[in-house]
Image (tube, rainbow, N blue to C red):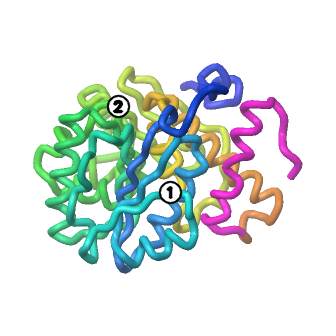
């Protein structure tokens, strides 16, 4: 097993050029939220805006977009006219990565739109972060492994992984996870205490940040947006996943030091994501 540490991550960091503009740093499409779960989309979008990618587009329902416009004025907005995700945005080729799943719900129209979206993403070779309801929808589809775009990252917690890869025990499930990575070229982030990343080469990366204070609703949505933004920024799947889990966990460690593990929410994680970038770039701890 390879531990994910600052020393492991620093050589992988991409640098920004002085003579550059927003289109040099990628464009992320976030597909998340529905009329009854708008918050998940906002958490993913807010984290994506802290990832370093150039542009973030949120495709969601009217209620979600209304809240996003007030919370994140730098995000672009694309309206889905229904109460759930039901239409694939036009000109998908404009995006360098997708982040799909937080708060989508399970409507029949969403399942159909998901198949169309992933089919086009596979054809155009646009990598995606697949989380939450995107994974739950995949788990009930036949031949779902064929719908994973090359270079994608799946971010299940233990329950979602059980639905995706039903088997006798956790040991067998880990073997199936590696086989899935090898078959599809994806990386799997198994979320939890010291999250693990399964790679197509059969390696396992183990995160070294994070704490029980992050075991709250919405923490995974923040991770989805962050990894999606890193993919869009130009990182490969392994580097985006490794950077994402480490920076995400470091934000939780900063908040626990400030407020205890009990007294912060997943929304607070977004504002502390820069602390992880700072430590990696400057080799210094920020003041807690």
Q: Nearer the viewer, residue 81 or 41?
A: 81
Residue 181, image quadrant: top left
Magenta run includes residue 272:
yes
Q: Which of the two marks, 1 or 2, is nearer to us in this view?
A: 2
Q: Is residue 196 visible?
A: no
* Residue 82 in the image: above or below residue 55: below
Magenta run includes residue 8:
no
Q: Are marks 1 and 2 in contact (CB under 8 Å)?
A: no
* Residue 198 in the image: above or below residue 189: above
Q: Looking at the picture, how far across and down is residue 136, in whole percent? A: 28, 59
Query: Which label number is shown at residue 151?
Result: 2
**Residue named by callout 1:** 220
Residue at x-position 29% and y-position 31%:
150
Q: In the structure shown, which secondary structural element does the residue marked by tag 2 occupy? A: loop
Query: Which label number is shown at residue 246?
Result: none
Q: Is residue 214 visible?
A: yes
Q: Name the side, left or right, on which 94 lies relative to 113.
A: right
Prevailing secondary structure of the magenta residues: helix
Q: Which residues are magenta?
A: 264-288
Q: Nearer the viewer, residue 159 or 5?
A: 5
Residue at x-position 66% and y-position 38%:
208
Q: Looking at the picture, how far across and down is residue 131, in whole percent? A: 38, 53
């Amino acid at each position: 097993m390879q531990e994910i540490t600052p020393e492991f991550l620093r050589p992988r960091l991409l640098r920004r050029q002085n003579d550059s503009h927003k289109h040099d740093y990628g464009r992320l499409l976030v597909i998340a939220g529905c009329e009854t779960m708008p918050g998940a989309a906002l958490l993913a979008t807010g984290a994506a805006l802290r990832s370093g990618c150039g542009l973030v587009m949120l495709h969601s329902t009217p209620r979600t977009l209304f809240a996003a416009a007030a919370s994140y004025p730098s995000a672009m907005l694309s309206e889905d006219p229904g109460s759930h995700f039901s239409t694939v945005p036009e000109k998908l080729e404009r995006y360098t990565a997708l982040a799909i799943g937080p708060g989508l719900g399970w409507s029949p129209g969403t399942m159909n739109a998901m198949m169309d979206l992933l089919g086009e993403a596979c054809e155009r070779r646009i990598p995606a972060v697949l989380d939450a309801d995107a994974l739950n929808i995949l788990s009930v589809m036949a031949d779902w492994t064929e719908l994973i775009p090359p270079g994608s990252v799946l971010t299940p917690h233990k329950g979602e992984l059980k639905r995706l890869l039903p088997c006798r025990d956790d040991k067998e499930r880990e073997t199936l996870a590696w086989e899935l990575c090898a078959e599809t070229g994806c990386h799997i982030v198994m979320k939890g205490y010291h999250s693990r990343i399964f790679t197509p080469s059969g390696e396992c990366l183990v995160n070294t940040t994070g704490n029980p204070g992050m075991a709250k609703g919405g923490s995974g949505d923040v991770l989805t947006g962050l990894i999606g933004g890193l993919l869009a920024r130009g990182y490969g799947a392994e580097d985006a996943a490794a950077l994402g889990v480490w920076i995400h966990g470091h934000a939780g460690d900063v908040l626990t030091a400030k407020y205890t593990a009990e007294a912060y929410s997943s929304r607070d994680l977004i504002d502390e994501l820069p602390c992880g970038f700072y430590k990696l770039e400057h080799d210094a701890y920020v003041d807690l």
